[in-house]
Image (cartoon, rainbow, N blue to C red):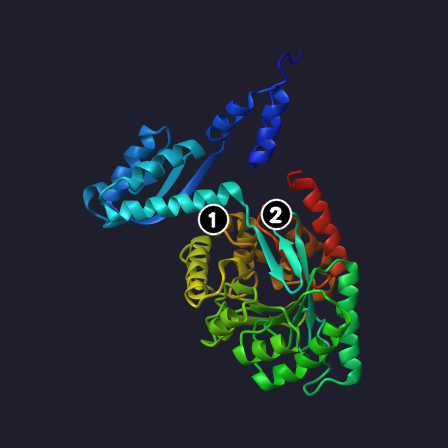
């Protein structure tokens, strides 16, 4: 018979660990001292010089942690090395304090970046963003973005156009009814797009896109105060959509396709979604039953590459004058990533927390689900549910962009109840 009932406690959040300590009757002052000693992190940094790597290694060891670096750098066979820093929060903060005092500017910069990353990981306090007439407090729950595709060639099979051309009054009514049903079923934001972004899709010009989306935005604005997002990478489309009543911009190219988009978003002071995207038509492969997917997409290090490129897009936004509180980041599941890369991304989405921005995750009905389960788009609701639950449970989703609003809103609420701190 067990005398002490030893068990392993999950303490991947400060709240859960604090709760356990309080239950023991630990002194509140002691809790604040012990918390940083109990949470362990592994951080990866890139391209350290020999001197920087050696100093960092010694400081990590001296403070009770460790750092893994390339052995070749000691023999002059490499000019730089990446490093894995392993230690508790307390250890890492003590090393950061040392780095701030180093004479090497590179180590001072590393100290700043480590401090920012640790702050973003530890606090996860993202504040509030106003979208239209509503305030979105990111730490309260997972928000739902419902998709309305005004296209004839949506990969998901839910496009509202049977063929190219102007929207009929019936199509406008159908789109508005769909959006209003989404709001009733739990959608917090309605995302309206007039150009398919499926692998291998053909682009349309701005005028065609406007012809598709403006009538719906105008009519929907009359019927609901729910925030409306315009899904476009073209500044001309975004401008007209905002004038018609849209409240935010969802740019699948993260301000990189149209140089006028960043200044427009800054001028209009609206929220913007910056998505990571490496899509190239030459890498798109089509199957009649399962649809398109990307193949032979090369990443040196998937998560590191995504983080680096997203940081570049964030810099573009900030330099253009876009308010930091108005930036939402999307790692771009399905956009320029293979089935396997999408699965890896979703499984490691919590690594994006170091950015310190709210995250939008869009796994809905996508090809990585279809090719994994061997199912066409209309039969991917269960796979989407698994992806949504995982993204939330990993702590990596503040907004879920989905087609099946009623079902996925329930998945999100249930997952929130299971994993969010109370």
Residue 244 higher or lower than 73, as above or below: below
Q: Residue furthest bottom?
A: 165
Mark 2 to mark 1 CA distance (whole Å): 16 Å
Whether residue 258 is visible, yes or no, is yes
Q: Position of residue 124 (x, y in %)?
A: 54, 45
Tag 2 secondary structure = loop
Q: Tag on residue 121? A: none
Residue 311 higher or lower than 37, as above or below: below
Residue 120 higher or lower than 399, as above or below: above
User: Which residue is painted at 56% across and 55% down in the image?
Assistant: 359
To which residue does mark 1 refer?
354
Residue toward you, 116 or 299: 116
* Residue 348 appears left or right of 407: left
Image-quadrant location for residue 23: top right
To which residue does mark 2 refer?
139
Q: Position of residue 249 (x, y in %)?
A: 58, 69
Q: Say whether disc 2 or disc 1 marks the residue closer to the N-terminus.
A: 2
Q: Position of residue 316 (x, y in %)?
A: 42, 66
For label 2, count other residues whose C-alpha is less than 10 Å away and answer few (under 14), some (14-19) or many (20+).
some
Q: Residue furthest left?
A: 76
User: Which residue is painted at 36% across and 46% down in the image?
Assistant: 112
Asked whether the beta carbons under mark 2 and mark 1 sit within 8 Å of each other, the answer is no
Image-quadrant location for residue 11: top right
* Residue 92 appears left or right of 129: left
Tag 1 secondary structure = helix
Q: Position of residue 325 (x, y in %)?
A: 53, 57
* Residue 361 appears left or right of 174: left
Q: Nearer the viewer, mark 2 or mark 1?
A: 2
* Residue 265 appears left or right of 196: left
For label 1, count other residues whose C-alpha is less than 10 Å away and answer few (under 14), some (14-19) or many (20+).
some
């Amino acid at each position: 018979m067990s005398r002490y009932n030893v068990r392993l406690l999950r303490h991947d959040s400060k709240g859960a660990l604090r709760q356990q300590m309080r239950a023991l009757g630990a002194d509140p002052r002691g809790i604040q001292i012990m918390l940083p000693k109990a949470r362990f992190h592994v951080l990866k940094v890139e391209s350290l010089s020999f001197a920087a790597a050696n100093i960092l290694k010694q400081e990590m060891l001296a403070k009770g942690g460790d750092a893994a670096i390339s052995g070749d750098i000691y023999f002059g066979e490499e000019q730089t090395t990446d490093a894995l820093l392993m230690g508790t929060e307390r250890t890492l903060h003590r090393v950061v304090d040392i780095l701030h005092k180093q004479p090497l500017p590179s180590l001072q910069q590393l100290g700043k970046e480590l401090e920012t990353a640790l702050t973003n990981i530890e606090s996860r306090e993202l504040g509030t963003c106003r979208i239209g007439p509503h305030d979105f407090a990111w730490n309260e729950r997972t928000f739902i973005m419902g998709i309305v595709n005004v296209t004839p060639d949506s990969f998901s099979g839910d496009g509202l156009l049977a063929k190219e051309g102007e929207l009929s009054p019936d199509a406008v009514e159908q789109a508005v009814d769909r959006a209003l049903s989404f709001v009733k079923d739990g959608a917090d934001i309605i995302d309206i797009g007039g150009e398919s972004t499926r692998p291998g899709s053909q682009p349309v010009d701005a005028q065609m896109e406007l012809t598709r989306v403006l009538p719906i935005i105008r009519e929907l604005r009359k019927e609901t105060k729910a925030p409306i997002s315009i899904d476009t990478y073209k500044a001309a489309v975004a401008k007209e959509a905002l004038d018609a009543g849209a409240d935010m911009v969802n740019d699948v190219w993260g301000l990189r396709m149209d140089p006028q988009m960043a200044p427009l978003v800054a001028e209009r002071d609206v929220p913007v979604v910056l998505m990571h995207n490496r899509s190239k038509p030459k890498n798109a492969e089509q199957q009649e039953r399962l649809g398109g997917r990307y193949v032979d997409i090369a990443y040196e290090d998937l998560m590191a590459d995504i983080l680096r490129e997203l940081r570049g897009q964030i810099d573009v936004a900030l330099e253009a004058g876009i308010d930091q509180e108005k930036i939402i980041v999307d790692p771009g599941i399905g956009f320029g990533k293979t089935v396997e890369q999408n699965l890896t991304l979703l499984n490691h989405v919590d690594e994006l927390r170091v950015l310190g921005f709210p995250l939008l995750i869009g796994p809905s009905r996508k090809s990585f689900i279809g090719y994994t389960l061997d199912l066409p788009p209309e039969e991917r609701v269960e796979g989407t549910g698994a992806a949504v639950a995982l993204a939330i449970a990993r702590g990596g989703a503040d907004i879920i962009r989905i087609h099946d609003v009623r079902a996925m809103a329930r998945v999100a609420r249930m997952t929130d109840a299971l994993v969010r701190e109370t």
